[in-house]
Image (cartoon, rainbow, N blue to C red):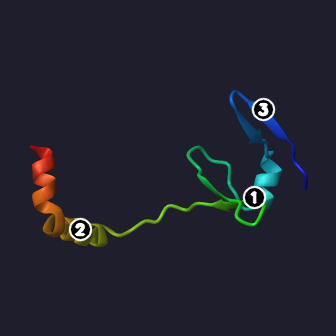
Amino acid sequence: MVKKLQKVGNSYAIILDRPTLETAGVLPREGEEVDVNSGSGWITLVPVSPQFISPDELKEHLDRIGKERGAVLKRLAD
C-alpha cells in the first residue's frame, strides 16, 4: 500500500483509514499510541500496549523507590 504525505499545519501526516489500521492490528481507540520506527527507511506501525502490574508489584516498586530515593523526594517536596 502506498500513502501520500499530507500537509497538516506545520507538519505532515499519513492518513490511514480504519480498515488499514485493523489489517495492521492497530485498533483505533482514543488514547491509542503508535511507535514509529524508521531506522530501515521503512515506517513500521507497532501498537504500544500498556504494561499493567499487579497491586503487589506496584507496592514493591514504590517501597524500593522510597528506600532508595526517599531523602531526595522529601527535599523536593519541601
* First in sequence: mark 2 vs mark 1: 1
Element assignment for label 3? strand
Label 2 or label 1, whichever lies nearer to me, is 1
> What residue sits 59% from the left and 43% below the top?
30
Element assignment for label 1? loop
The x and y percentages for residue 44 are: 73, 61
The x and y percentages for residue 17 are: 81, 45
Mark 1 = which residue? 43
The x and y percentages for residue 62 are: 22, 65
Please state, as top left, top right, bottom left or bottom right, where the C terminus lies in the image: top left
Q: Nearer the viewer, residue 55 or 64?
A: 64
Q: Which amino acid type is marked by label 1? A: Ile
Mark 3 = which residue? 7
Q: Nearer the viewer, residue 17 or 11?
A: 11
Tag 3 near tag 1, CB within 8 Å: no
Mark 2 = which residue? 59
